[in-house]
Image (cartoon, coloured by chain):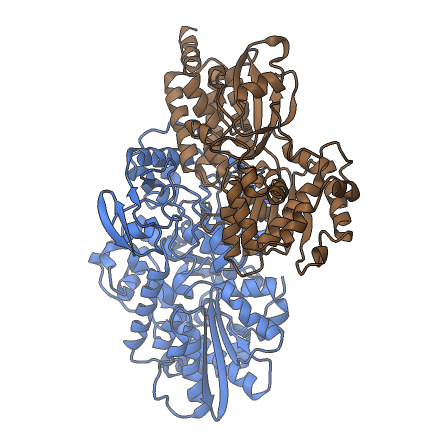
Amino acid sequence: MLEKRILTQRFNKYDGLSIRQYIDLDGFKALEKAFSMSSQQIIEEIKLSQLTGRGGAGFPTYIKMQAMLNETRDKYLVCNADEGEPGHFKDRHLIEKDPYQLIEGMVISAYAVGANKGYIYVRGEYNNAIQQLEKTIKIATTKGYLGNHICDSDFSFELVVRRGAGAYVCGEEFALMESIEGKPGRTRVKPPFPTEKGIFDYPTLINNVETFCNLPTIIEHGGEHYSTIGSNHAKGTKLICLSGNVKHKGLYEVPYGTSINDVISELGGGTANDIPIQMVQIGGACGPIIPPRLLNMDIDNEAFEIFDAKMGAGAIIVIDENYDLFEIVLRNMQFFLHESCGKCAPCREGHIQIVKLLQKFVNYQATHKDYVSLQSLAEVIHTTTLCGLGQTSPTSVISTMTYFKEAYDKRINQQNKE
Amino acid sequence: MATITMNNQQLEVTNEMTILEAAKAHNINIPTLCHYPDLAINSDCRICVVEIEGKRMLPTSCSTPVQDGMVIYTNSPRVLQARKTITELMLSSHDANCTACTRNMRCELQTLSKNLGIDINRFEPTYKDLPIDDNNPSLVRNMNRCIKCGRCVDVCKTVQGVHVLERMGRSNEMMIAPAFNQSLNNLICTYCGQCANVCPVGAIMEKDDTDLVWENLHNPKKRTLVQVAPAVRVAIGESFHSLDDTVPIGKLVSALKHLGFDEVYDTNFTADLTIMEEGNELIYRIQNDDVLPMMTSCCPGWINYVEQHHSDILKHISSCKSPQQMFGALAKNYYKEQENLNKEDIFVVSIMPCTAKKYEAKREEFTDQYDNPDVDVVLTTRELEKMFRQMGVDFDQLDNRDFDEPFGMTSGAAQLFGASGGVMEAALRTVTEVLSGKPLKSLDFSAVRGMDGIKEASFNLKGQEIKVAVSHSLSNAEQLIQGIKDGTSPYTFIEIMACPGGCIGGGGQPYGTDSASRLKRMETTYRVDLEKDIRKSHDNPAIKTLYDNYLQKPLSELSHHLLHTRYYPR
Ligand SMILES: Cc1cc2nc3c(=O)[nH]c(=O)nc-3n(C[C@H](O)[C@H](O)[C@H](O)COP(=O)(O)O)c2cc1C
Ligand code: SF4
Ligand code: SF4
Ligand code: SF4
């Protein structure tokens, strides 16, 4: 069995609304256990589990929690459910199919770091997920799992749903918090980091949906047990959003260390119509595009360092040989041209120029000079921009220039012949 | 302390420093663009990036704190390539028609691209033909030149607290604009011009009125009068190398004569007159239990702000016109009668540190029924500088001349009008003496001097404890205004100036105005006062003569008619 279902264990076993059924499926056990532990004990378990953020950057979760603990002011919790990265739909499933698991994970985190108010910032298009969250938050509040004196303890935690307005950059943590504050979604200068100065300048713990959803299982079974799942470098399971030219698109949960190839061929059933794979993009529009020969690599953050990129939030997009590489890369960059917040110069002015250069490649008009400009532009956007959007947006250009250099050369030569 | 290595040089720096500050402290130059001394770090331009050993990314030195053991390169090939590319990108979206721009040779973007050795731009131009916003008397916004550094947004928001400008839209269509991209004249803009002063390029500028002045200087039918504000003389020397470290009053008068003005007068004269009127208004208000605290009225940026935002406290504002407008009224009435001229024959120009003064001169209250304004044109310090360059004025060749009479003799108190706290101090010199009937022992009211945002002082007036307050930068005024609104204000008299430091930091002052240059101008201001024989407005014999021959006495009917005005909610 390639799949290992931990976060998705209750999927389709209840309707995602009945709190009774959630409890019957062992729900809120971890929360009760957490209330018998101290903040430091909980964070210790998370440290042992080696849980890392599932929102894309892969930062150790316990470090952020520990930083929060050192703060004595009012604190906030934020769940990042913006899920704007193309190719991702895992957070929507986690919310729609098991919302109480997320609520439970958030209450445990809030209790551990001492936050009394939390926001869930949900992608604006996710109508069902928003409705479901609003309903289940109400139910959980009446049943005493949210609100004042949770489970008759001294701890209170209020949870509020916020609807995003459709900007991809609002998934970036600072832009998201600006947006919650009612301002335009643009990032802030770092440092200070959210755990020092987050929402309304108060210490804030911001995590991805999937990250929070891991907490109940870690607390229930212990951090050490959790750390036995996965690979040498990455622990636990990862939700994979498989899409593109495969037979069985969809959401899969696999342990870290599973090879990409296995996911595509065994779970995805290979390409539709058995047309050979040309390339695979991992992590969404901001992820690397890699050739078939590299697909035996593992799903693992460290392994991705060779791409100067992160594993991302779990998208695997399979592209077969019917597609033009340059059109795919162009489409990626048009996405970022549209989504740049416009704050910093290289991202704001760079994407329009990258798009112009790529259009030349698509139209067989590019020269070697264009290749050099494209390369330096991608490098400069990657290394000098203010937030993760610009820092990761040229990954598809940089990775294809590395792994598909001959395609670029061929395109330039074709121009010369015409 | 931390030890870092910068360009192979070991440096001892404090832990709180950013890389940029550490470099500056050791004379290592890292180019910047969006960075401005007194404003927040927004690290939008990314020009100041540096390479840190072991790091793939190139962080901005303005926002990255040093860490012990850091190995930094400020000029590595990767860094130079990045800076060049970013500058090319900015140039590609910028209407770089340099020779047809006021900022030519004084533009921070131009200087940067010159220093980086950019001789070709690899990228296609992307700027659009955006409409120019110029339907107000003070400022012109040409967003085709904007490089989106955010300085103007920050100064308007945090220094002035007015919140007119914002980043609007996203990606390469992001624009710095007032709400809904309206033009400035539909809005709550005070025309203080702080945005124009900090703009590194020619995207926000004062409305250029120099052509109109040239035209009238060469019209033989016109008698041309010019008045020079106190803050101009302590700043304009910064723009001309040969005027270094002088207060070039005599040469300034000479140069203005050179341009062709018939009469060169001093706004300080009407500053003295303002003290006579405003001081007596204050005494009247105190003695008649009238509305207190009284607030100053000489700053048009402040008047705009209060009319727009706080019209419920208008009765606290002194009814005195500003010195500029008092001068205009005297010129178009008293001077006209003395010289037996028609109003249309007199052309009055003011040289002001201020863009809001351009708006003030156009107010209906200061224009007669035939549309003749008391002040015809207001030029900023920067526009005067431009005219001097156009004329090729060589200050080395000029002699020192005195201001013309009858509006040339002034007191030291009048010079103080240029600095925050100056109107207060000048008024206190006069009011305390008039009320007590005894000469002051010390003329220096040091509590109202200096750069603190809000300054307070209290003193004894005929056995009565009187409290006064002074603020500069509009964001600081808010606290004093709230006190008045909720009835807790303990003050009798409040001075408010819209710009940081007062007029010496006005929006029309030379480019590059920052806290250091404001401080220097402030020191010069107090030096000029100290060197004057007459240091109290009521001791100015020319003022006495004006009252004896014409106005009769402060707050007389004629004074009220010529020197006082009203305010309206907007
Ligand atoms: C442009 C951009 C978009 C992002 N979008 C998301 C998102 O949709 N969901 C998310 O969880 N994290 C997103 N992130 C990452 C967040 O900034 C942040 O790292 C994350 O919420 C931290 O949570 P984690 O530690 O649980 O991963 C985005 C980052 C960038 C730069
Ligand atoms: S990298 Fe792009 S999205 Fe991020 S702050 Fe800069 S302009 Fe905005
Ligand atoms: S003139 Fe003053 S108030 Fe108006 S936009 Fe500029 S800084 Fe803001
Ligand atoms: S108008 Fe000037 S100060 Fe404002 S963002 Fe543009 S370039 Fe910067």
Q: Quadrant of residue B275?
A: bottom left
Can you see residue B29?
Answer: yes
Percent position (x, y) of residue A226?
56, 38
User: What residue appears at the point 49 percent right and 22 percent down from the top-left corner?
Assistant: A289
User: What residue appears at the point 43 percent right and 6 percent down from the top-left corner?
Assistant: A418
Chain B as rendered: colour: blue
Q: Is residue A11 left or right of residue B183?
A: right
Note whether B11 is above or below B418 in the view shown.
above
Q: Is residue A192 left or right of residue A75?
A: left
* Residue extending farthest top: A417
B539 or A198, nearer to the observer:
A198
Image quarter hosting the N terminus of chain B = bottom left
Percent position (x, y) of residue B174?
53, 39
Percent position (x, y) of residue B491?
53, 80
User: What residue appears at the point 43 percent right and 74 percent down from the top-left corner?
Assistant: B423
Percent position (x, y) of residue B175?
52, 41
B515 or B270, nearer to the observer:
B515
B356 or B118, nearer to the observer:
B118
Q: Quadrant of residue A313?
A: top right
Output the letter for the chain in brown: A
